[in-house]
Image: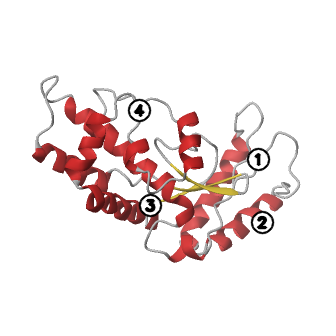
Amino acid sequence: MLVLKRNDRINVFIFCFLVNVMLQIRLVSSGDMSKLREVMEQKAREQGIDPHNLKKGETFMIPPELNDEEEGSHHMPMAHRCDGCTAVAHQFEKAFAKAHMHVKKGHPLSLADVLDVADLVCDKRLREYGLKNINGDKYLSGEGLPKEKEPGILEAGGKWDARLSTLCKELIEKYEEDGIYDFYKNKGKDRLVYSLCTSYCSEDEMTTLRKVLQPLKVNKRDEF
C-alpha cells in the first residue's frame, strides 16, 4: 500500500509502513491476492488511513483483483492480448535495433542473428511485465506499454512471464522469425506493433496506440 502526496514525495512514515506490508507478502499465497488486499487495507486502518475515504490528493494502491481467466488461464487473457502483443513487438523492435548496431550499416541481419533475437525475446525479455491496478481498472504494464509510468502495484513474473512467452511463440508460429524481421525492416518510421499485432488489437486499440506510443530509442550501452 502506498499513499502518494500531491507533490509526489513519500514520507518516511508511509515508507516504513510499506516495508512492513511487503514483509507479510511471503505469508500470503501468490494466488490469494484478495487476502493480500485485506491485509493491506487492515494495516492502513491501523495507521489511521481509510482506504475507502481518502483525503484529497492521496491514492491508495492495492494489487489487481484477478478474474477467473486472469487467475487460471495458461494463455494471455483476451482483455490483455493487445497489450501483450505490444510488449512483444516492443522487445523485438528493441532487440533488432540493438543487433543492427553490430553489423555494417545498410546490411541485414543474418538468419542466425534473427533466430538469436527471437530466442532472446521469447525466453528472457518478457519477465518484467505484469498486471497493474490503476484507479480500479486493470492494465498490462511494463516497458513500452501505455501504462508503464502510471503509479500502481504490479503483479509481475510467474504466469505473466509464461503467458507473454507463449504469445511470443504464437507470433513466431504465425509469421516465422524471418517474417517478423521483414515487418521490422519494412516498417519505416512506424512502430513494429502496427504491423505485427493486427490480429491481437482492435481498430480502436490501434488508434489509441498511435496516439500514445513514442518513437523507440535504443542506447548503444543498453544491455541486450
- Compute the Cα span from label 3 to label 1: 25 Å
For mark 4, what is the residue?
190
Q: Quadrant of the N terminus?
A: bottom right
Q: Residue at x 34, y 29 (%)?
A: 188
Q: CA distance from mark 4 to mark 3?
A: 29 Å
Residue lying at 20% horizontally and 48% vertically, measured from the top left: 178
Amino acid type at mark 1: Thr
Name the quadrant of the C terminus. top left
Q: Which residue is mark 1?
A: 59
Horizontal relation, residue 84 to residue 168: left or right: right
The residue singled out by tag 2 in the image is 42
Q: In this view, which residue lies farthest toward the top?
A: 105
Taking depth in this image into account, of 152 and 91 the one nearest to the observer is 91
Where residue 98 sits: x, y (%)? Answer: 26, 34
Cα–Cα span, label 4 and label 1:
36 Å
Query: Does the rendering let one see residue 41?
Result: yes
Q: Residues within 10 Å of mark 1 (few under 14, many from 20)?
A: some
Label whose residue precedes the other's in the sequence (4 or 3): 3
Q: In the rendered structure, which amino acid carries the disc numbered 4?
A: Asp
Q: Nearer the viewer, mark 4 or mark 2?
A: 4
Q: SS for tag 2?
A: helix
Mark 3 lies on residue: 157
Is 154 displayed left or right of 220 in the figure?
A: right
**Along the line of sight, the residue nearer the viewer: 7 or 135:** 135
Q: CA distance from mark 2 to mark 3?
A: 26 Å
Instruction: Say whether disc 4 or disc 1 marks the residue closer to the N-terminus.
Output: 1
The residue tagged with tag 3: helix, strand or loop? loop
